[in-house]
Image (spheres, helix red, strand yellow):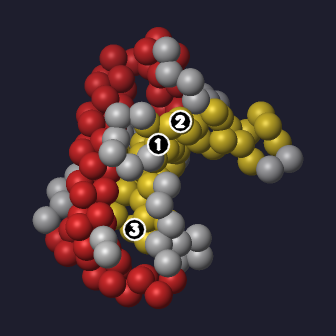
Amino acid sequence: MDKPKSLLNDVSSFLLKRGEEFEWITMPGDPGDRIGLAYVQFDTSLPCSFMFTEVQKPLTLVLDVLFASRIASQDYAEVGLLLQSLNANQPHGSFMLDMEAGYVYFRQTLVVEGLELSGEQVANAVRNMEATGVDMANKYAEIISREFSA
């Protein structure tokens, strides 16, 4: 039986070639079971980390841009409405609020089931997802500072 394609291996190869430092995310108790990789993105106005994971069925590459700015619980409703309006015209992903932790993140997905992508095609997809992630991080920082400045 063929082993399923690992998009994360392709992503890590691309990041290593670029000289990016990243950490593998593993299952608790099993460091060999890699479920994602994460790294800090430095070219955004709001500190954030990028986390790539993959879904096997259908084969999908997922990028979560995690913003390092906690939302106060009393602001959840207002931020939720703000994110809903941002998502209304967002073709490349969606902003989400983690109600337990109080953090906002931006999620993009790329379904590649049935496609035979080369390493270079995966690298191009990663670059495009990163560029969108950086744009959304800067957009989110601008809106949050404008909406919640005293």
Residue plotted at (23% across, 67% down): 146
Secondary structure beneath dot 1 equals: strand
Residue, disc 2:
39
Residue 6 picture location, percent across and down = 54, 31
Q: 60 or 148: which is nearer to us? A: 148
Quadrant showing the C terminus? bottom left
Q: Quadrant of residue 31?
A: top right
Q: Horizontally, is 36 left or right of 62 in the view?
A: right
Q: Tell whether label 3 touches label 2 (CB within 8 Å).
A: no
Q: Residue furthest left?
A: 89
Q: Horizontally, is 140 left or right of 91 in the view?
A: right
Residue 128 picture location, percent across and down = 26, 34
Residue 38 picture location, percent across and down = 55, 39
**Amino acid residing under circle 2:** Tyr
Residue, disc 1:
50
Q: Which callout, 2 or 1, points at the residue further toward the start of the chain? A: 2
Residue, disc 3:
96
Residue plotted at (65% across, 35% down): 24
Q: Tell whether label 1 touches label 2 (CB within 8 Å).
A: yes
Measured in 3D between alpha carbons, the distance from the residue under mark 3 to the one under mark 1, in whole angstroms, is: 15 Å
Q: Quadrant of residue 25?
A: top right
Residue 3 picture location, percent across and down = 61, 30
**Amino acid residing under circle 3:** Met
Q: Residue furthest front?
A: 150
Q: 56 or 87: which is nearer to us? A: 87
